[in-house]
Image (cartoon, rainbow, N blue to C red):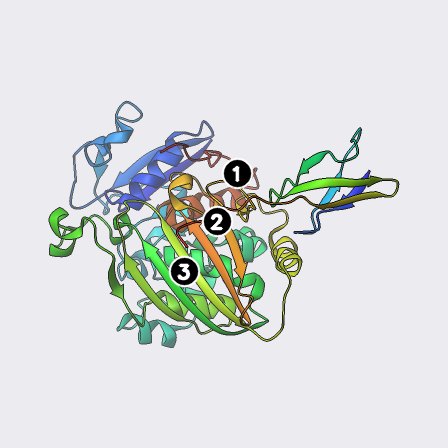
Amino acid sequence: MNNECPMCGCVLCYTNVELNELLPCPDCGSDLEVRSLDPFTLEMAPLEREDWGE
Amino acid sequence: MNTVSIIGGSGYVGGEVARLVLMRDDLELVQVTSSSTLGEHVHSAHPNLRGRTDLRFTSPDELKDVDFIFSALPHGTSDSKMKDLLSHAEHVIDTSADFRLNDPEVYRKWYGHDHASPELMESFPYGLPELHRSEIREKGRAAAPGCVATSTILGLFPFREIAQRVLVDSKIGSSAAGKTVSDSSHHPERSGVIRPYAPVDHRHRAEILQETGVDVMMTVHAVEMVRGISTTIHIEIGEKLTEKDVWGYLRSTYGKEPFIRVIRSQKGIFRYPEPKLIAGSNYCDLGFELDPNSNRLVVFSAIDNLMKGAAGSAMQCMNVIMGCDETKGLEFTGLHPI
């Protein structure tokens, strides 16, 4: 199943994925959630943010 | 087996070139010259090379004929020695500033004296294979770029055509100042500083302008590192970009480059380029952030000043000239943790 990372545009190719599975983008490291298998749809998973001294 | 000489090999760049050459089984290091340490073992100046070579420093007046010469002579010296060097080797890679610029007038403006061999300036391609690969291969020579210039050019180059105004803020380790001691390099003075050493008019601006067409504003600080450069490039752009657009610029420019990595992670500790992680490697790590409140693109660029900023690029140029795998001898990844 092909798609692109919604954050960085990296072309992704996965096999044997499951609905709601979290997949890391190899380029930008974003956690992507499989929101639909047909059509194959990826969305950004909720991100836990750090407070870097702000 | 290609034979190699290093001219002016007692400094840090010469030592780093020696280390890279000695790690390869397809190169033979036959000579390292130095006037200041004549007759001493090479490992007396570069203790990490003990057990790897028994060579002693020889006189620069007794050059052997070899396939490749790496010249690590000081700035303002290579230009007068180059004709002699070229008579002893088919291929010369110069790590000084003397052959980076291709216009004698520009050279005089930034270095304060006339070039001794202006007719040779254009025969030395600027030694960044990412920009001049075919020219380096064709001419069989290269002028290894300046270290701050390398980190800036590689970060700015993909965006040069949309850049309206560029401000460069570079932080640099002590080894970039070379091996000659001074009051400012004395440990009690140097340790812990964040010292603006070139607030304006850093000489590498000339190289950056030549290679990108962008006349940048630039300030360089000396910071608490031995190796490494972290350069932040603030680019005012004339259009709104998305993160995906920026990734696109970087991928279309450097997609297949073996030493350029984009570090722009959404999680983890090191989300942007970090020079300590690539110490000893030939990588240039690039990262970025878009300012949501303005048309500012911030690009981060990290290198090891002695590797991608000097000896590593020089060896990469050698690989291009030899026609071998460009990463040969430059496979080291850096250490973690360090």
In the depicted view, which residue is nearer to us: A24 or A19?
A: A19
Q: Amino acid at mark 3?
A: Ala
Q: Which residue is mark 1?
A: B327
Labels 2 and 1 positioned on one and the same chain? yes
Residue B123, position as x, y percentages in the image = 46, 61
Q: Could you tell me which chain the residue with mark 1 belongs to?
A: B
**Residue B77 versus residue A46: which sits nearer the camera?**
A46
Number of on-image labels: 3
| In contact (CB < 8 Å): disc 3 and disc 1 | no
Residue at (34, 51) in percent of width and height: B85
Q: Residues within 10 Å of mark 1 (few under 14, many from 20)?
A: some
**Distance in Å between CA atoms under marks 2 and 1:** 23 Å
Amino acid type of the residue tagged 2 in the rendering = Tyr
Which quadrant of the rendered structure holds the C terminus of chain B? top left
Residue placed under numbered mark 2 in the picture: B272
Question: Looking at the picture, do discs 2 and 3 lie on one chain?
Answer: yes
Q: Residue furthest top?
A: B51
Mark 3 and mark 1 lie on one chain; the one further toward the N terminus is 3
Specify which label sits upstream in the sequence, 2 or 3.
3
Q: Which residue is mark 3?
A: B149
Which label's residue is closer to the chain start, 2 or 1?
2
